[in-house]
Amino acid sequence: MDSAMEDVLDAVGPRLRALRRARGITLADLSATTGVSESTLSRLESGQRRATLELLLHLSQVYDVPLDDLVGAPRTGDPRMHLKPIRRFGMTFVPLSRRPGGTQAFKMIIPARAEPLEPTLQTHEGFEWLYVLSGTLRLVVGERDLTVKADNAAEFDTSLPHWLGSADGGAVELLVLFDMQGVRAHVQGDRTTRAQP
């Protein structure tokens, strides 16, 4: 077995222990949930025992994490993005870009609600550009209360008090570009197709 594989396997135990502790689960609780003895789990976490696929599958289900994340498997050149949604303010944000700083891209999902929410305006540094994929967005920026339908875009300075929600109680999906430095999104067309005066 090569040293890279050994390193991956050696890191499984400490990763499992850290995950269990972060979740506030005792070995006794984990044993009761999985049906695996406390001594086996303890030896697994201390590195005295190698994890079997069966053990890892049990733990993956209990911790609700992908098996690859559980063992820290190295990326294999798969070109697909493995997106991890973030839930805030009752909405779901799916990061579409990975690089720190600069412009960040997100898919934002505002769930349907029986009762519309009252706007709670907020401010922060930056500039935001959004494109509504489906649904009807209610966008409040300063004194303006706007409705943005699917296939339409908007941009605004986030230092102005603003709020995003559903205009009609239905679900809304949108793409959001956000930049902390306040750089505006620009659409650049083909210069050869400009209208002639």
Image (tube, rainbow, N blue to C red):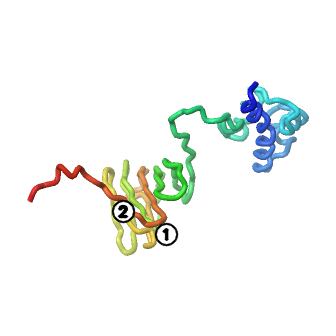
Tell me the residue at 77%/30% (across/down).
55
Image quadrant in which the N terminus is located: top right
Is residue 4 in view? yes
Query: Which residue is farthest front?
Result: 3
Q: Quadrant of residue 184?
A: bottom left
Residue 89 in the image: state x and y as whole percent.
55, 60
Query: Which residue is farthest top?
Result: 1
Label 1 packing within 10 angstroms: few (<14), some (14-19), many (20+): few
Residue 121 in the image: state x and y as whole percent.
47, 70
Report which residue position mark 2 lands on: 155
Find the distance from the CA under tag 2 to the CA under tag 1. Answer: 14 Å
Is residue 109 in view? no
Residue 2 in the image: state x and y as whole percent.
74, 27
Q: Which of the two residues, 190 or 33, is positioned nearer the viewer here?
A: 190
Label 2 packing within 10 angstroms: few (<14), some (14-19), many (20+): some
Q: Are marks 2 and 1 in contact (CB under 8 Å)?
A: no
Q: Is residue 139 above or below residue 188?
A: below
Report which residue position mark 1 lands on: 125
Query: Which residue is farthest right?
Result: 39
The mark tally for this picture is: 2
Residue 123 in the image: state x and y as whole percent.
49, 71
Tell me the residue at 88%/33% (across/down).
48
Q: Is residue 73 above or below residue 136?
A: above
**Nearer-N-terminus badge (2/1):** 1
Mark seen at residue 71: none
Amino acid at pointer 1: Glu
